[in-house]
Image (cartoon, helix red, strand yellow):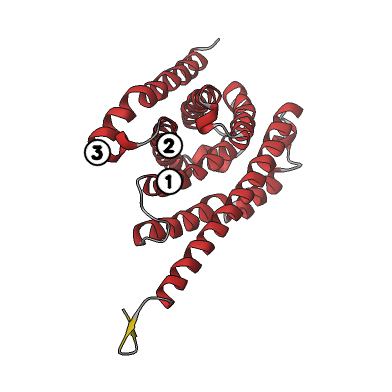
């Protein structure tokens, strides 16, 4: 094993240990200090709270790293299949450690946070990342997929509001819900044409045929699998936002009126 591969393995293991530590130790302590309502949650809610706190930290870390690569890593942007994967592999190693950690927590706390779609999502991502980390291929596309993590903090913030007692129709939760839907759409749905057009541009080139069959399957099938789930989640989010906005409009219309004006 070459020294860089050893470094990537070390980063993945360190990432796994760090996110386990954040879940079991740091999140409960910080959450208690910042939000007294955390102590009033049920055990299942505390598990999900800690899980979402950790996923938010992971999303912010790798998301910022992704943006840097996207704008400043010329080697990856010029050669999306075989460009220098050093920075991308580092970022993917961090995510790999997180995904394995999260899978372990999902299985262990299945009654609280178990979700078959998250399991499929994590396994599909890990399957693709195996080729990125092992052979350094497709760095541009691996980095592009990680940009989707920017939707995670908004999704989690909305859940935090709801579990702390904010009604869905309250202004803070409504504003966060709309922001969540917009961000989710922008980083997971609106970017699909860009992603697949770049994939189509690469298809059939010499660089493409240098990718082994397993790598092609991991790249194409994992991308389609992840985007099907993104569309399903977007549909669910859109329906939720529509219901909340309708409820808010109905309550406003039914509010007591005085002198012809809504109170």
Real-space CA distance between mark 1 and mark 3, rounded to the nearest whole angstrom: 16 Å
Residue indicated by mark 2: 52
Kind of element beneath mark 1 = helix
x, y (%) of residue 213? 76, 28
Question: Residue at point 35% right, 45% down?
Answer: 164
Q: Are marks 1 and 3 in contact (CB under 8 Å)?
A: no
Residue 34 tag number: 3
Quadrant where the C terminus lies? bottom left
Lower sequence index among marks 2 and 1: 2
Kind of element beneath mark 3 = helix
Quadrant where the N terminus lies? top right
Q: Are marks 3 and 2 in contact (CB under 8 Å)?
A: no
Residue indicated by mark 1: 159
Question: Residue at point 56% right, 41% down?
Answer: 145
Q: Is residue 161 left or right of residue 69?
A: left
Q: Which residue appears farthest toward the top when viewing the image?
A: 1
Q: Nearer the viewer, mark 2 or mark 1?
A: 1
Callout count: 3
From the viewer's side, name the closer residue of 141 and 55. Answer: 55
Q: Is residue 225 left or right of residue 86?
A: right
Label 1 environment density (alpha carbons within 10 Å; few <14, some 14–19, many ≥20): some
Q: In this rendering, does residue 35 appear at all?
A: no
Q: Is residue 4 left or right of residue 256?
A: right
Question: Residue at point 67% right, 46% down?
Answer: 228
Lower sequence index among marks 3 and 2: 3
From the viewer's side, name the closer residue of 16 and 253. Answer: 253
From the viewer's side, name the closer residue of 142 and 108. Answer: 108
Q: Is residue 112 above or below residue 77?
A: above
Real-space CA distance between mark 2 and mark 1, rounded to the nearest whole angstrom: 9 Å
Q: Which residue appears farthest toward the left when viewing the image?
A: 33
Q: In this rendering, does residue 9 appear at all?
A: yes
Q: Are marks 2 and 1 in contact (CB under 8 Å)?
A: yes
């Amino acid at each position: 094993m070459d020294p860089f591969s050893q470094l990537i393995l070390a980063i993945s293991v360190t990432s796994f240990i760090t996110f386990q530590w954040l879940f079991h130790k740091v999140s409960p302590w910080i959450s208690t200090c910042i939000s007294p309502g955390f102590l009033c949650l049920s055990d299942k809610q505390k598990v999900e709270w800690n899980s979402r706190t950790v996923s938010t930290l992971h999303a912010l870390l790798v998301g910022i790293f992704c943006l840097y690569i996207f704008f400043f890593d010329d080697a990856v942007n010029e050669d999306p299949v075989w460009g220098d994967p050093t920075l991308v592999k580092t970022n993917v190693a961090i995510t790999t450690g997180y995904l394995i950690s999260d899978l372990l927590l999902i299985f262990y706390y299945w009654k609280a946070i178990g979700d078959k779609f998250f399991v499929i999502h994590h396994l599909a991502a890990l399957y693709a990342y195996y080729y990125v980390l092992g052979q350094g291929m497709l760095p541009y596309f691996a980095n592009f997929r990680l940009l989707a993590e920017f939707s995670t903090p908004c999704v989690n913030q909305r859940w935090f509001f709801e579990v702390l007692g904010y009604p869905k129709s309250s202004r803070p939760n409504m504003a966060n819900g709309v922001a969540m839907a917009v961000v989710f759409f922008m980083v997971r749905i609106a970017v699909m044409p860009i992603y697949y057009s770049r994939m189509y541009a690469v298809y059939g080139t010499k660089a493409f045929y240098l990718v082994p069959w397993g790598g092609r399957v991991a790249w194409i099938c994992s991308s389609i699998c992840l985007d099907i789930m993104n569309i399903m989640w977007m549909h669910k989010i859109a329906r939720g936002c529509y219901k909340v906005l309708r409820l808010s409009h109905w309550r406003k219309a039914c509010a007591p009126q005085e002198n012809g004006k809504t109170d």
